[in-house]
Image (cartoon, rainbow, N blue to C red):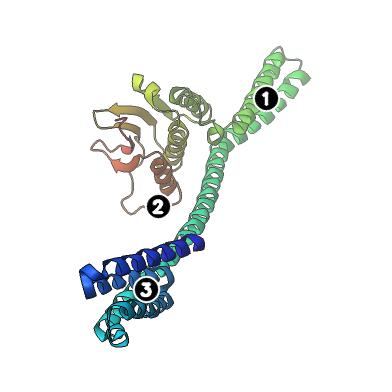
Amino acid sequence: MKLTRFQTYIMAWLLYVAFIFSMYSQLQITVMLFSIPLTMLGGWLYLYRGALLTTLLSLAVHYGLFSIHSDQPALETLNPFGIASQLIFSSCTALLKTIQVKYHKLNDSLEEIVVERTKDLDQLTAYLIDAQQLENRELNDRLIEKPFEELKAMLATSQLLKQKLHAEDHPRAIVAENISMIIRDCIKQLCTIDDYSISQIPATGKMTEVISLLRKQISQVSIVDIRYQENPNWETIPENMVPDLCKIMFEAVANALHHAAPKYIFIRLENNELQTSFIIENDGKPLDPDYKEGMGLPLMRYKAGRIGAELSITSTRSNLTRMTCSLPSKS
């Protein structure tokens, strides 16, 4: 960079000297005007010292020129208007260059700050997502806790009944034993469901497959009816959007189960020429106008923003709470 700058400076000097010595006889004193661009170049390349040095060197060259073509070379060389013009224009150029250098330094510093803040934001987002997944896990535990306790109580009762019937040599003792085995199987199945809960459903593959798995899991731990509208456009959703859409769906379903106590949750698509809308509705408690957002909704909006979608939550005329994720058009 320094070598290129020096080479440019020397080349400009050679051209200038060759020009003024060859063209002075035709242009006379007018050739001195070309010293202004030269000193401006010196100011641009080497700032104020370049402007001053180029001006002084030009005076020496002009003196040599006037020694050939004038009887008063010193008087012709020390032209106050020409010297002042050189210094003013070159100093202004050096000032602009200084401002540009400071601007680039500030811009680089700003970019470094932006990169650092972006890393911090990504770390915070990852932390919030982990925290939200933990919250979902706690929700799953709450959903399973009540049936688990009831099954354990039923198992204890069936064990007592079985012992009593065996002690009395009752013919129904085998039935009581079968009931105990069924309850044990239910507890075992509930533990399996807990290990493979809603927050752990893989958010990959096709949307229809994930929705089917979600419905199956919810049906095993809750009486809430998860309805699903078949639509050929499910298959057209780009694969890169599926993971974030699935996470948005899990969050919306978990929120509905946690806060709204619905009888059903309806998952569907709506299409038009401009966009595809991914919609989740529930008939539970309406959205409170004074509701203060926790982490769930901002994270859902963040995930929607990553795929270029817009997310909104509204109440319909039929008192349904509707979450709409508007996907961008393919065009």
Q: Earlier in the sequence, mark 2 or mark 1?
A: 1
Label 2 and label 1: CA atoms lie apart by: 41 Å
Give the mark, 2 or 3, whose residue is nearer the N terminus.
3
Residue mark closest to the camera, 2 vs 3 = 3
> In this orientation, which residue lies closer to the viewer: 249 or 107?
107
SS of the residue under disc 3 = helix
Front-lying residue, 109 or 79: 79
Chain-order first, disc 3 or disc 1: 3
Please tell me how crowded label 1 is: few (under 14), some (14-19), or many (20+) other residues with Cα within 10 Å.
Answer: some
Pinpoint residue 280: horizontal percent, then vertical percent: 36, 33
Q: Amino acid at mark 1?
A: Arg
Does the residue at mark 2 contact the one at mark 3 (Cβ under 8 Å)? no
The label shown at residue 184 is 1
Q: Which residue is mark 3?
A: 94
Which-is-in-front pick, marks 2 and 1? 2
Whole-percent x, y for residue 215 in the image: 47, 26
Residue placed at 25% from the left, 72% from the top?
33
